[in-house]
Amino acid sequence: MRGLAKPSFESEACTGQYEPGQDSKQNRGDGFMGSRQAVSRTSIGTIAALMLLVAPISAMDADETATYQLELDITWSAETNPLEFPLGAHLSSVLAATHHGRYTMFRDGDTASSGLELVAENGRTSIMKAEMAEAQRRDRLDAIIEAGALKKVPGQVTMTITAKKSHPLLSFVTMIAPSPDWFTGAADVSLIQDDKWIEQQEITLWAWDSGTDSGESYTAQNLDTQPRQSIRLVTTPHFLGEAGLVPFGRAMLKRVRE
Ligand SMILES: [Ca+2]
């Protein structure tokens, strides 16, 4: 499971492929007129190919889709968060999506979905992926990307994501493990600013409480919260330092051009 997650769609930008052999095959053995036709058809073909190659590159590649490398640099460790730092500290697999404003993975003050509850409590992504597939069916969400778990912290997780202009927001979550219902991630990161794809961005990651379990420490017994409370930052002493909340790490987004 560890390693690069491939975007669920690739090379979607340019589907019209010019095939150089096409014109000569069509005009083979047509005699003199056929050759002239072949020449003019080839010229048209060449012009068409040039138009495909030159004109739409900026319009399609630069505008309709953009590919990003997302690196999560997790700093959470016994050094940064010494209080009761747990044995076997790790992150579950990372679930990411590109979407538009009618899909929300999580939001401060909202109630967690069943999918987010399961990710935050057990690191299991099945229900959240089903929720995402439903959002995909409604065209609210485009790409779903899953990257392997981070088995040891501190450490990095890297994934590659291709976004479409129609779905320019990026969200991702992963379980803080072990924990009652804590997760880290970011939501609604806009990859388009001022009508242009961003080149890079750094996002501070925090520890979030999904409001679905009432445990107050990393290894607390399961204590289901009914009804669910709202999503909020984890403010237990585990994540409080002298300067306030201790960041969990950072996410670095970098646009990739092939
Ligand atoms: Ca629960």
Image (cartoon, grey):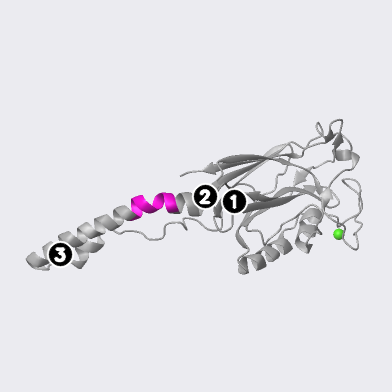
Residue at mark 1: 5
Answer whether labels 2 and 3 touch (C-beta < 8 Å): no
Which of disc 1 and disc 3 is earlier in sequence? Answer: 1
Residue 135 vertical position relative to residue 94 in the rendered view, above or below = below
Task: Indicate left or right for 74 with 225 as reference.
Answer: left
Residue at mark 3: 37
**Element under disc 2:** strand
Q: Label 1 to label 2, Cα distance in Å?
A: 16 Å
Which of disc 3 and disc 2 is earlier in sequence? Answer: 3
**Element under disc 1:** loop
**What label does residue 66 carry, if any?**
2
Q: Label 3 to label 1, Cα distance in Å?
A: 49 Å
Q: Main secondary structure of the magenta part?
A: helix
Amino acid type, mark 2: Ala
x and y percent of residue 212 in the render? Answer: 86, 57
Amino acid type, mark 3: Gln
Residue 31 vertical position relative to residue 49 in the rendered view, above or below = below
Does the beta carbon at disc 1 come under 8 Å from ligand 1?
A: no
Task: Indicate left or right for 51 with 230 as reference.
Answer: left
**Within the image, what quadrant is residue 75 found in?**
top right
Residue 56 counted in the magenta span: yes
Does the beta carbon at disc 3 come under 8 Å from ligand 1?
A: no
Does the beta carbon at disc 2 come under 8 Å from ligand 1?
A: no
x and y percent of residue 62 in the render? Answer: 47, 49
Q: Residue at x 30, y 55 (%)?
A: 49
Which of disc 2 and disc 1 is earlier in sequence? Answer: 1
**Within the image, what quadrant is residue 240 found in?**
top right
Q: Residues within 10 Å of mark 1 (few under 14, many from 20)?
A: many
x and y percent of residue 66 in the render? Answer: 52, 50
Amino acid type, mark 1: Ala
Point out the stretch of residues depicted in magenta: 52-59
Q: Residue at x 79, y 52 (%)?
A: 108
